[in-house]
């Protein structure tokens, strides 16, 4: 009787333990060998670094073999991913430009990472609210930040220190800044511009408007603010700076390369560009002629609004991957977005560290000794927000970009040009 009771109690104990054990076991554990594909956009110069990191991953995850496949630019990868989803032959892990997550979320292309993060205790908030929002869709974490950039101003720090020039904090500060930073020749022509606006991509100047309340698309009213009194005032002020020779709007063929070379030749004090090109400016363009500084773009005149928009790329696991692929991809995704690898990639590529937990480490401090200009950008990373995901935004913002070229470079009348623009924009919005 005692033996029977003991066996019964043991059985009941096992029954009680089993559910608890099931709850604590990793539901996404890798239990047998698997090979997965990772589609990426890293060009040839990064192949050695990539191979080295994947070797480290293989040591930590011996059951997983990763086949990295270069698929070209972000737009190339997007096209190939869409085809792969249709054919139901997707990679386990894929890179995507930061402009795509909302569209992918709406189409159900990405795996919801929330349960994977909960099971592994992954601290997604270490990226900060802005980047979490940039990689989420309707409450689901559909991807994770990978190589992240944002809009910044590069400037000649050597000249700034020598001439006592402070970078502008707000749009209103731009006037005084440009007067100090611009140098004229004796004949009145510009010897050194105060700044250059990147007119080949609206991303480089749009926050000057947005941080001051202008909405390219006012979604509540389904119209644009681009011809409002405020938008016209900002546009007129930039046009004035261009007319006076303080600045110019880089637009047309070769605009990006021409702007970069002008900065390297000290023909402009500053430029609006992407933070991801820090290494290019320092090591390829300037090459030690002067120290390159990097500042957050001017914010709103309220002195409180300093938002920027996310650039770069994210990592996602396609929903149509098999569960075994997803499990292995999640291990790789955790590795590639870990604080250590995040800092390493940032150091090697020119993007900036996005994991807040690295900022107090010795490795981060050593990183800043070599890239001191990054500190001001990393410290403001919580202000980075998702890009506008309205289906007509890109089309409308490019029409705006072309209209501004007429104003800034061809001296077209501000209000009339903006009115014509908004008439066209509102027609597009009405058709959505």
Image: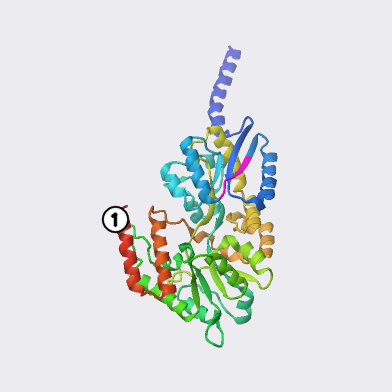
Q: Where is residue 167 in the image (x, y as percent from the top left)?
A: 54, 74
Q: Is residue 316 left or right of residue 364?
A: left
> Considering the image in quadrants, where does the N terminus appear?
top right
The residue located at (55%, 37%) in the rendering is 326
Residue at point 64%, 58% (across, down): 360
The residue depicted at 64 percent of the width and 36 percent of the height is 64
Instruction: Tell me which corner region of the image, top left, top right, bottom left or bottom right, holds residue 406.
Output: bottom left
Provide residue 32's location: percent of width, then percent of height. 63, 29
Residue at left 49%, top 61%?
A: 383
Which residue was labeled with disc 1?
Answer: 430
Q: Identify the residue at the far front of this view.
A: 253
- x and y, in percent, of residue 256 in the image: 54, 65
Pick the residue in front: 361 or 180: 180
Residue that extends furthest to the bottom in the rendered view of this protein: 186
- Residue 227 picture quarter: bottom left
Eyeballing the image, is 203 above or below 302? above
Q: Furthest-top residue in view?
A: 1
Q: Foreground: 176 or 141?
A: 176
Vertical placement of residue 281 versus 10, above or below? below
Towards the viewer: 234 or 164: 234
Q: In this view, does 291 lie to the left or right of 167?
A: right
On the question of residue 79 being in view, the answer is: yes
Q: Is residue 337 left or right of residue 299?
A: right
Query: Of helix, strand and loop, which mostly describes the magenta segment?
Result: strand
Q: Which colour scheme is used?
A: rainbow
Q: What stretch is highlighted in magenta?
A: 67-72
Q: Is mark 1 on a helix, strand or loop?
A: helix
Q: Can residue 173 be seen in this view?
A: no
Crowd tier of the residue under label 1, counting other residues whose Cα lies within 10 Å: few below 14, some 14–19, many 20 or above:
few
- Give yes or no for residue 100 being in the magenta stretch: no
Percent x, y for residue 65?
65, 36
């Amino acid at each position: 009787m005692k033996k029977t009771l003991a066996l019964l109690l043991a059985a009941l104990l096992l029954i009680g333990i089993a559910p608890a054990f099931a709850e604590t076991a990793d539901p996404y554990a890798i239990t047998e060998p698997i090979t997965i594909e990772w589609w990426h956009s890293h060009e040839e110069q990064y192949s050695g670094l990539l191979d080295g990191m994947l070797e480290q991953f293989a040591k930590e995850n011996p059951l997983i073999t990763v086949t990295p496949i270069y698929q070209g630019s972000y737009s190339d990868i997007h096209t190939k991913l869409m085809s792969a989803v249709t054919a139901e032959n997707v990679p386990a892990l894929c890179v995507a430009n930061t402009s795509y997550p909302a569209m992918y979320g709406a189409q159900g292309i990405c795996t919801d990472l929330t349960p994977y993060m909960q099971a592994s205790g992954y601290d997604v908030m270490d990226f900060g609210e802005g980047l979490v929002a940039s990689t989420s869709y309707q409450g689901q974490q559909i991807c994770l930040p990978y190589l992240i950039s944002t809009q910044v101003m590069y400037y000649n720090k050597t000249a700034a220190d020598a001439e006592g020039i402070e970078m502008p904090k707000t749009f209103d500060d731009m006037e005084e800044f440009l007067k100090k930073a611009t140098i004229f020749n004796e004949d009145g022509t510009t010897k050194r511009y105060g700044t250059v606006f990147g007119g080949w991509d609206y991303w480089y100047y749009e926050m000057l408007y947005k941080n001051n309340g202008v909405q390219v698309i006012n979604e509540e009213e389904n119209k644009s603010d681009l011809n409002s009194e405020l938008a016209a005032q900002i546009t007129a002020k930039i046009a004035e700076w261009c007319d006076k020779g303080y600045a110019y709007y880089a637009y047309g063929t070769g605009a990006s390369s021409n702007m970069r070379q002008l900065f390297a030749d000290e023909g402009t004090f500053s430029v609006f560009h992407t933070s991801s090109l820090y290494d290019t400016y320092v090591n390829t363009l300037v090459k030690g002629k002067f120290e390159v500084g990097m500042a957050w773009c001017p914010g709103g005149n309220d002195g409180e609004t300093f938002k920027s928009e996310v650039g770069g790329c994210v990592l996602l696991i396609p929903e149509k991957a098999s569960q075994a692929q997803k499990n292995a991809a999640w291990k790789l995704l955790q590795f590639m977005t870990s604080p250590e690898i995040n800092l390493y990639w940032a150091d090697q590529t020119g993007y900036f560290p996005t994991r807040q937990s690295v900022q107090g480490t010795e490795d981060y401090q050593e990183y800043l000794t070599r890239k001191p200009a990054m500190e001001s950008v990393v410290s403001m990373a919580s202000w980075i927000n998702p890009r506008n995901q309205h289906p007509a935004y890109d089309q409308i913002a490019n029409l705006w970009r072309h209209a501004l070229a007429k104003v800034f470079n061809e001296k077209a009348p501000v209000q009339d040009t903006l009115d014509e623009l908004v008439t066209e924009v509102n027609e597009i919005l009405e058709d959505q």
